Image (spheres, helix red, strand yellow):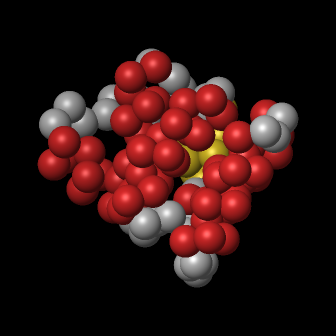
């Protein structure tokens, strides 16, 4: 799943003025489409949206899962990742960037 730059920017613009439930839906949609250069804008959206609880990451790109993991670590949130039928709650996150990247890849692929 992708989208043109204009389509992705439009989704980001819509998310900025949405309420929390709508922002969560936009965050999930964007997580499936973003590219590396959208990362900063996506992180900003996650910071204003993420509350903890359970997050369905089925179909999300690794960069999106990694952004959520980093913000979860920074804010000391408890978050469960749902991928299809699997639900994974992380109790201890890796501390280094390369390990967070590898962990995000495994979570995004449903390997956990």
Q: Is residue 16 visible?
A: yes
Residue 25 in the image, given as x and y percentages of width and height: 76, 52
* Percent position of residue 44, x then y: 52, 36
- Residue at the spot 33% in from the left edge and 29% down from the top edge: 92
Task: Answer with left or right where residue 98 lies relative to residue 42.
Answer: left
- Asked whether the viewer can see residue 58, the reply is no
User: Residue 5, how many percent across, how many down?
Assistant: 55, 71
User: Which residue lies most toward the front here?
Assistant: 6
Q: In this view, does 10 lie to the left or right of 20?
A: left
Residue visible at 39% across and 22% down in the picture:
74
How many marks do you count on the picture?
Answer: 0
Q: Which residue appears at 61% of the width and 65% of the height?
A: 8
Q: Is residue 13 above or below residue 53?
A: below
**26 or 112: nearer the eye?**
26
Instruction: Residue 81: give x, y in percent of width and height.
Output: 55, 48
Q: Quadrant of residue 1?
A: bottom right
Eyeballing the image, is 109 above or below 26? below
| Residue shown at the point (26%, 45%) measured from the top left | 100
Camera-side residue: 78 or 1? 1
Image quarter of the C terminus: bottom left
């Amino acid at each position: 799943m992708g989208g043109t730059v204009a389509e992705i920017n439009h989704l980001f613009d819509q998310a900025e003025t949405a309420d929390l439930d709508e922002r969560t839906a936009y965050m999930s949609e964007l997580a499936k489409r973003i590219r590396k250069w959208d990362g900063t804008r996506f992180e900003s959206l996650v910071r204003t949206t993420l509350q903890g609880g359970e997050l369905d990451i089925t179909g999300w790109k690794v960069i999106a899962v990694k952004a959520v993991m980093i913000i979860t670590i920074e804010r000391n949130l408890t978050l469960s990742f749902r991928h299809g039928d699997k639900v994974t709650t992380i109790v201890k996150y890796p501390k280094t960037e390369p390990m967070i990247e590898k962990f995000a890849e495994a979570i995004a692929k449903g390997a956990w």
